[in-house]
Image (tube, rainbow, N blue to C red):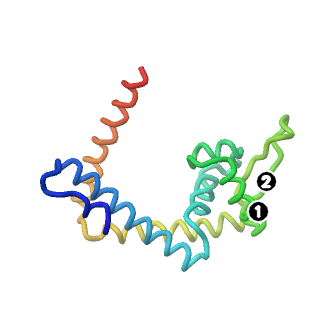
Amino acid sequence: MDLEARAHSEHPEALRLWLRLLTCTQLVEKQVRNGLRAQFATTLPRFDLMSQLERSPDGLKMNELSRRMMVTGGNVTGITDQLVTEGLVERINVEGDRRAWRVRLTPRGRKLFNEMAQQHEDWIVEAFSSLNPKEIAQLHKLLGKVKQHSHSSQLAETA
């Protein structure tokens, strides 16, 4: 039973929509996870870490990687250790801070990530292939409104 099946017709439509979004997210993420495992023998967290590094060619400090990925430093360290062993990322000393490391993709890691990223894009495009371009644009715009409203609400709460 997926999350959406928990909703009943008497529940507010907004709640039913929320559950549908969660269900769709979980289904697409499962497809991506399975594809990464089957085609690249890797995991989504490893892909996510490499994705962050791809956007920062000079590398990132471990604490910045942790913040961007919204996981603990221990999680980032474990994934980084694996990727270093495989020659996909490298650790570089941070000048002026003997305790800190900067992590960056190696050329081999960048090549593999580019292959994975192209396949990832194809999986996501396929996941939305039942929608035409106009519907995709409309959904994107509507979800943007929800995002903006939620962001504005959070700012008001912290003020």
Q: Which comes sooner in the sequence, label 2 or label 1?
A: 1
Corner quadrant of residue 135: bottom left
Name the element at disc 2: strand
Counting the numbered discs, the total is 2
Q: Position of residue 70 (x, y in %)?
A: 56, 46
- Please tell me which residue is depicted at 54% across the width and 72% down the height of the picture: 36
User: Residue 102 or 63: which is nearer the viewer?
Assistant: 63
**Considering the image in quadrants, where does the C terminus appear?**
top left
Q: Position of residue 33 (x, y in %)?
A: 50, 69
* Vertical side of 104 occupied by 114: above or below: below
Q: Position of residue 53 (x, y in %)?
A: 64, 53
Q: Amino acid at mark 2?
A: Arg
Mark 1 — residue?
A: 84
Name the element at disc 1: helix
Q: Amino acid at mark 1?
A: Val
Q: Which mark is residue 91?
A: 2
Corner quadrant of residue 96: top right
Instruction: Using residue 124 as the reference point, say whether residue 75 is left or right of it.
Output: right
* Vertical side of 95 occupied by 111: above or below: below
User: Residue 44 or 108: which is nearer the viewer?
Assistant: 44
- Please tell me which residue is depicted at 61% across the width and 65% down the height of the picture: 113
- Please tell me which residue is depicted at 32% across the width and 66% down the height of the picture: 2
From this viewpoint, which residue is outermost toward the bottom? Answer: 38
User: Residue 156 or 97: which is nearer the viewer?
Assistant: 156
From this viewpoint, which residue is outermost toward the top? Answer: 159
**Separation of residues labelled 2 and 1 (CA atoms):** 8 Å
Please tell me how crowded label 1 is: few (under 14), some (14-19), or many (20+) other residues with Cα within 10 Å: some
